[in-house]
């Protein structure tokens, strides 16, 4: 009789343990995401790569102006770039998709600067200039990298994932937004019609 109970008890115990482990894994996964969001407010790298998150279909809106310092302490206003096509990229050095697309940004900036295209990066690293400045110097980024204040990300919209890239026309209107990394041909395709507008 005891051997029969053992045969029934062991499979039941295995099922209970498997269920408990599954619940633990799901809880740990949610805790990891929550922890990442808390460490960099409302920003989780690579959590959303789908084109369904693009806001390209939204009506153009005026890009919020800002007053932010670059890595050398120089103040930049978005309005300083009125008349140019601005590609405004929210990113961080710890974000693999962000790092992957930066070489394309560098090449496009060099190729299209004489057409009035201006890339601007806003680095969201918690460590600020101490982390960002040496990283940018070692990667020879030729366009301004700015450090955020407490409100700039909120002004542009909640960022549950980075990179986030805004395409701003010569009149200062946001015309397209990409959430997640994009390949160079897609970036160039988004820029081209804005360059053509005079």
Image (cartoon, grey):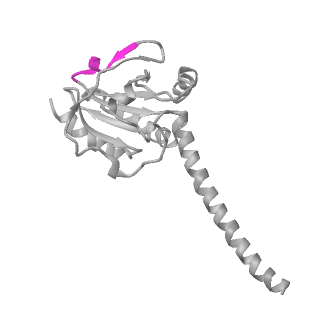
Q: Is residue 170 left or right of residue 16?
A: left
Quarter holding the C terminus is: top left
Task: Please name whichever residue, 101 or 177, is drawn nearer the observer in this view of the structure.
Answer: 177
Quarter holding the N terminus is: bottom right
Q: Residue at x 38, y 25 (%)?
A: 152
The magenta segment: 75-83
Across and down, in percent, residue 51 comes to: 34, 51
Q: Is residue 18 left or right of residue 115?
A: right
Let me know if residue 82 is in the magenta part: yes
Across and down, in percent, residue 64 comes to: 28, 25
Most distant residue in the right direction: 2
Q: Residue at x 76, y 76 (%)?
A: 10
Q: Residue at x 64, y 66 (%)?
A: 19
Task: Please name whichever residue, 41 or 190, is drawn nearer the observer in this view of the structure.
Answer: 41
Let me know if residue 185 is in the magenta part: no
Task: Please name whichever residue, 23 or 53, is drawn nearer the observer in this view of the structure.
Answer: 23
Across and down, in percent, residue 136 comes to: 51, 26
Q: Is residue 128 left or right of residue 10?
A: left
Across and down, in percent, residue 12 comes to: 71, 75
Most distant residue in the front direction: 1
Task: Please name whichever residue, 140 or 119, is drawn nearer the observer in this view of the structure.
Answer: 119
Most distant residue in the top direction: 74
Query: Against 73, is 19 above or below?
Result: below
């Amino acid at each position: 009789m005891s051997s029969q109970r053992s045969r029934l008890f062991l499979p039941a115990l295995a099922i209970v343990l498997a269920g408990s482990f599954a619940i633990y894994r799901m809880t740990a996964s949610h805790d990891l995401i929550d922890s990442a969001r808390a460490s960099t407010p409302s920003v989780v790298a690579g959590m959303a790569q789908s084109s369904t998150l693009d806001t390209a279909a939204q009506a153009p809106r005026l890009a919020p102006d800002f007053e932010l310092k670059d890595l050398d302490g120089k103040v930049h206003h978005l309005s300083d770039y009125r008349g140019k096509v601005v590609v405004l990229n929210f990113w961080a050095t710890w974000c693999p998709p962000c790092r992957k697309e930066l070489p394309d940004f560098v090449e496009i900036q060099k190729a299209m600067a004489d057409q009035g295209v201006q890339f601007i990066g806003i680095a969201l690293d918690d460590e600020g200039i101490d982390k960002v400045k040496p990283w940018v110097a070692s990667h020879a980024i030729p366009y301004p990298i700015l450090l955020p204040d407490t409100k700039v990300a909120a002004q542009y919209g909640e960022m549950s994932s980075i990179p986030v890239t805004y395409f701003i026309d010569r009149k200062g209107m946001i015309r397209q937004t990409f959430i997640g990394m994009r390949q160079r041909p897609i970036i160039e395709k988004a820029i081209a019609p804005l360059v053509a507008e005079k």
